[in-house]
Image (spheres, grey):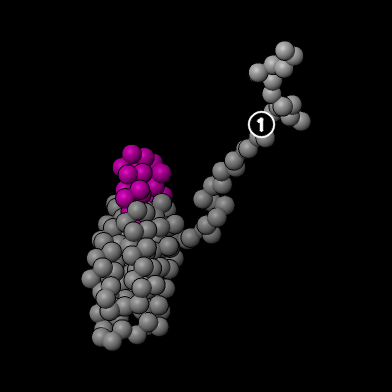
Amino acid sequence: MNAHPTRFAKSGSRERPSFRPVLETLEDRIAPTSAAQASAAFDQLPTDMNNLLTSMAARPVDASTVNTNLGAVINDVALLQTGASQFVVADRLQIDDALYTDGFLLLYNSFADYPFIPPPQSFYVFQVGCEAMLAASSDLVLTGLFPQTSGDSTLS
C-alpha cells in the first residue's frame, strides 16, 4: 500500500493570519468638557430630570416632549460623565451621587410608565438610567481607589 492514512492536503500558507487589535482611548472619542460646562450641567440636571419625569407621567404622553426632555437629560449626563474627573474629590462624589440617584429614577420610571409611553422612549430612558448608574459606580470606585486622579475645580 502506497497511501498514507495521515497524509494532509498541502496548504499555501501554514501561518495563521495575525490579528492585532488596536485599543482606542476615551480621550480619542470624547470631546473635552470644561469644568464650567460640567458645573452648569450639574445645576441643570435636577430641572431637566423633573421635566422628563413630568412629561412621562402626563396622560396621554406626548412623545415629542419626552424626546426633547430626554435629550436634555442625556446631554447633562454626558457632560457630567466626561467632566467629573476635573473636580475635587468631595464635588466628584456629589456628581456621582446625583448620577446614580437620577439613573435609578430613570430606571424605575421606565418600567413604571412602560404601558403609557411608546416602547422606543421607554427603552431609551432605561438605557440612559443604566448608563448614568454605571458611570457613577465606576467613577466612585475610581475616586475611592485613586483620589489623585481628581482635578482641582469645584462646583459653583
Spot the residue most to the top. Answer: 1
Left/right of residue 109 with respect to residue 25 in the rendered view: left
Q: Where in the figure is residue 119, as x and y percent of width and height?
A: 36, 73
Q: Is residue 59 above or below residue 92?
A: below
Query: SS class of the residue under badge 1?
Result: loop
| Residue visible at 56% across and 47% down in the picture | 24
Residue to which mark 1 is pinned: 16
Point out the image quarter for the C terminus: bottom left
Could you tell me if residue 47 is visible in this image?
no
Q: What is the three-letter code of the residue carrying label 1?
A: Arg
Is 41 or 152 nearer to us in this picture? Answer: 41
Q: Is residue 61 magenta?
A: no
Q: Is residue 48 above or below residue 18?
A: below
Q: Main secondary structure of the magenta part?
A: helix
Is 86 or 154 nearer to us in this picture? Answer: 86
Q: Is residue 92 above or below residue 14?
A: below
Left/right of residue 18 with respect to residue 70 in the rendered view: right
Q: Where in the figure is residue 73, as x and y percent of width and height?
A: 37, 70
Left/right of residue 75 with respect to residue 58 in the rendered view: right
Magenta span: 136-156
| Residue visible at 74% across and 26% down in the picture | 10
